Structure formats: structure tokens, C-alpha cells
Amino acid sequence: MRGQTIFYIKPLLLLLTAPLSMLMVDTAAAKYYRTDQAVPVVLVHADAADASEGDCQQVVLVDKSRQEVTLYRYDGRWQISAQWPCSTGKVQGRKAIEGDQKTPEGVYFAIRDVGARYLTETYGSRALPLDYPNLLDQQQSRTGSAIWIHGTNKPLKPHDSNGCVVMGNAAINDLAARVKLQQTPVVIVDRLERTSIKAQRAQSSAVLAALEQWRHVLNHGSFAAFKKCYERPAQPTMAWWRQWCRQRGSYSVGPEHQSILSQRLVIRVGDTYVALFDHYLATRAHRVWAGRRKLYLKVGDDGVRILGDHFQSRTSSTRDPLFQAWKKLWRIDQRDPSIAAGKKHASDS
């Protein structure tokens, strides 16, 4: 399942077949916004935070044209939590090659939090290294490394870095305290554009319907249907599918093995969408987290294409966290007396 993946889904078919709940996007926001009110175009959709988590979804936006870092949070509507000035690359445009002194554009994640004791004075009080180049950068043969958000001991000057996003020391310390490593997206754009809530809902409907279709095929589809979701050479093997089918059919009582997508967040950069979600496997009684999953998608006239598939964070270091989560779920169910009794009843009848 991991690696580069592509599938095609006709938007009209999706809108007709997807459950109504999947198409009623961001209804909680309706009481806060008029449908013609402008919102950042990159913030396409967010599910309300799980009350049990006691947290909210957040996105860091870096606007290169305004030399500004903004932290947005979603708690039924998008709003600004904090805002700081910054400095980006000395050369305008999107980073393409090593040493071009340009700041990349796309969706990234901070992978470490490095304190001042491990840094030279150039990086100020703190640094958050980003995961550039990401999958799309690699597909486009973009090169370079060591793109960080970091502090500075000098006064900020606009467009003065070698490609990093530079902030004042107090600002980077504040930002680091608010974001979660490997979880909070850092979206870097050349210029932040805005759109209406109405247009935003139209965008998100197609993407969310595509996610639901992908989930449905994973739960219930045949190998032929699943293989059609992918473009060569990324098609899954029959061996993988047989193993997955054995897992799907392992429970003889109650609903079959289910794949659940929770805490969905959809971001748009240019003509590319990034969908983030918590991927769970579940039976009637229990569910197990496989990881925070990231899909790259492109919406075109011929449908929605998944360009990449990756577990952003996961339960283990195994090659396929989905199988590891299933094994854990199976062990939990085996210890559940009510499920054991149900299996015995089924075998006796």
C-alpha cells in the first residue's frame, strides 16, 4: 500500500455515490462564516477535534510574499492563534536545486526540535528541521537539504536566508511550544490566496469523497477493483491482497474488519492536495491506531488521483503498519470474553 500510488475516480460518480455525511463538508463552520467570506485557499477541510483528545487541529502557514508565519487552529472554524515576522530565501521562487538560496514550497513537517546547546550562533535559540524534500519534491527531482525553521541572534531582514525560514528567537521558541513534531503541517507558499467558503466546500467534497471511495475499496473491494485504483508500476501485488483478505475475513461474528479514517485534514498547495488522517482498524468492540497517514492527491477533469501514500507517524517501524495494527487488534479481541462467547455461539449454531 505504501509508495507511489495513483487512482482515478470520476467526480460526478463520487458525488452521487458517497454517503451524504461525507459531502456535508465543514457544516460546523456555517454558523461562523458567510458562504462568500474569504478564507485561506490552502485550508480546505478539517474535522473537529476528538473531544477525548482535548486538542485541536493546527496548521503553520509561511507566506513568502509577506514574510510572515501564521499559526492557524481549527475548533469548528479556522482562526489565527499567533503570527510572527520571518525571513525566507534571498532568491525568489520555489527551491529546485541544492544551493539556489530559494525556500521550498509545499507541505512539510518538523522532524526534530534542536535546542541552542546543539547549534551554532547562526541558528539562534532553536531549530526545527523540516522533511524537505518530500515525496512530491523527489518526484520532481528537486534537490537540497537542511531546510529548517530556526532562530537568529541578529535583526531580521526580509529575504535574507539561504533557503530556511528564519524567525526571531522569542518567536521560534513560541512556535516550537505550540506545534507537534511529525504531526503539525508546515505549509509554505509563495503568496497566500483566499477563497470563499462556498468554493472551499466544492473543493473538499471531491477530495473527501475520493477518500471515502478509497476506504470503501480497502474494506470491501475485490483485488480487481483495488488494482484499478493504482497506476503501474505501483499496483499492489496479489500476495499483499491475499494477506489483507485473510485479515478482513478473520472475524466470523459481527461486522467485518473495518478501516476507519479519523481527524481528517485537507490542505491545498497549487493543484496538489494533501490529506492527513488517523488510520484505525476496528471490529465491533475495539479499534487500534495504525498511524497518521498522508495522501498526496491531484484533482483533474478525469477525477481524483492519489500521487503518493505515506504513514507520517506510525505505531511501529514495520514496513506496513496496517498489518501490525491488525495483529494487535486480533490479540485484543482474543482476550475479550464477550467476543470469545460470540464465536462459540456461532460455531454451535
Image (tube, rainbow, N blue to C red):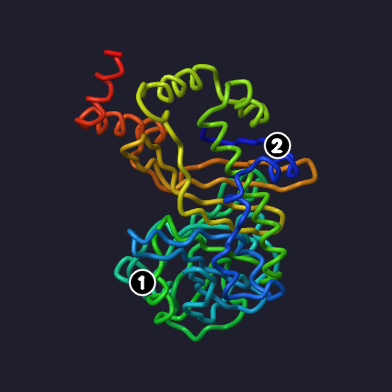
- Residue 55 position by quadrant: bottom left
Of 280 and 320, nearer the camera is 280
Frontmost of labels 1 and 2 is 2
The percent position of residue 302, horizontal first and vertical second, equals 78, 41
The percent position of residue 311, horizontal first and vertical second, equals 46, 43
In the rendering, at what x and y percent does residue 273 appear?
Answer: 64, 53
Q: Outermost residue toward the front?
A: 349
Q: Is residue 137 visible?
A: no
Taking the view exactly as shown, the residue that stands out farthest to the right is 301
Crowd rating for badge 2 (residues with CA inside 10 Å; few <14, some 14–19, many 20+): some
Q: Is residue 346 visible?
A: yes
Residue at 50% from the left image edge and 86% from the top image edge: 155
Residue under label 1, please give it: 177
On screen, residue 114 above or below 328: below
Outermost residue, top direction?
348
Q: Is residue 27 left or right of residue 198?
A: left
Q: Amino acid at mark 2?
A: Tyr
Residue at 57% from the left image edge and 78% from the top image edge: 68
Disc 1: CA contacts within 10 A as few (<14), some (14-19) or many (>=20): few
Residue 173 place in picture, x, y as percent: 38, 76
Q: Of marks 1 and 2, which one's residue comes earlier in the chain?
A: 2
Quarter occupied by residue 168: bottom left
Q: Residue furthest bottom?
A: 155
Disc 2 marks which residue?
8
Q: Secondary structure at mark 1?
A: helix
Local SS, label 2? loop
Residue 304 vertical position relative to residue 337 in the rendered view, above or below = below
Residue at the location (36% across, 63% down)?
113
Q: Quadrant of the C terminus?
A: top left
Q: Nearer the viewer, residue 284 or 76?
A: 284
